[in-house]
Amino acid sequence: MKKLNFLLIIATIIFSTSSCSFLKKRQSQWEPIKSKPETDPDKFEIKANAYTTKLFQRRCQRGDIHSCYLTGIILPPESTELAHKYFEKACKRKHARACTNIGLMDLFFKTRQDGALLQLEKACKNDAFTCYLLGNHYVDEKNDSKNANRFYQKACSKKYSAACFELGYHYDLQNDLKGTKRYYSIACAYNHEKACYNLGLYLEKLKSTKEAHSYFKKGCELMHTRSCNKLK
């Protein structure tokens, strides 16, 4: 599985900091997560300028928690510490995505390592994407499939298809028919095209041609080229 570093969720922001220990971090290290559209559920375009920043700051001061979160998102790269404070303000009022960004920042900048994962686990309670990121972290950084699957299951139960796919892939590697079929079929039902294709391949090996064809058809309808090729 492609290594997925802990990056901030929104593609519109690149973080840096004025702290001496942070100055060595270059902006080029930050990239938006590039995967299925669902990995960026809050994706939007805001023209970040002095007016919009002040607008969200004023709304935040009036108690609009989402504006506190948006302020953290659109602050300029040199304002990382201030952005962190706005995320903290929103997180305290149970804004899950703000809590996620705090955890991601702390992990990336290695400032609060002990609390970063706890922060992300807290956000996972209300945010499927955060659970999915934690699953990726345990696979990519810890090589811990047990904990990875625990968080993938949490995300999958919240209908996050990429997490269901990862579970199906795990059981596929283990040659576990029941687990493979269960999670690939769930992911496919949530419109994860590769899950439909993989399940089709798995069923094809089991000589379940008709059932395999139905999954290739679903994958093709979701614009998955290899699934379409299986229908020719």
Image: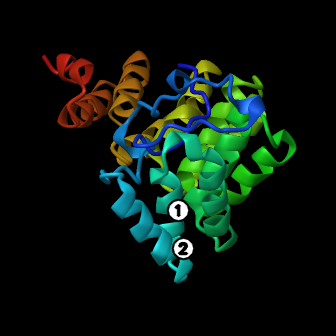
Q: How many marks?
A: 2
Q: Position of residue 89 (x, y in %)?
A: 65, 68
The residue depicted at 45 percent of the width and 33 percent of the height is: 32
- Element assignment for label 2: helix
Decide if residue 171 is in sight here.
yes
Q: Quadrant of residue 142?
A: top right
**Crowding near pointer 1: few (<14 within 10 Å), some, many (20+)?**
many
Which of these two is toward me, 113 or 176? Answer: 113
The residue depicted at 48 percent of the width and 52 percent of the height is: 73
Residue furthest to the right: 114
Residue 69 has which mark?
Answer: 1
Q: Looking at the image, is 214 positioned above or below residue 158?
A: above
User: Where is the C terminus found, in terms of image quarters?
Assistant: top left
Q: Looking at the image, is 27 positioned above or below residue 188?
A: above
Residue 209 has which mark?
Answer: none
Residue at numbered disc 2: 65
Q: Are marks 2 and 1 in contact (CB under 8 Å)?
A: yes
The residue depicted at 59 percent of the width and 36 percent of the height is: 16
Q: Position of residue 148 (x, y in %)?
A: 70, 36
Q: Position of residue 130 (x, y in %)?
A: 60, 49
Which of these two is toward me, 209 or 137? Answer: 137
Amino acid at pointer 2? Ile
Q: Quadrant of residue 224?
A: top left
Which of these two is toward me, 83 or 20? Answer: 20
Decide if residue 153 is in sight here.
no
The residue depicted at 68 percent of the width and 62 percent of the height is: 88
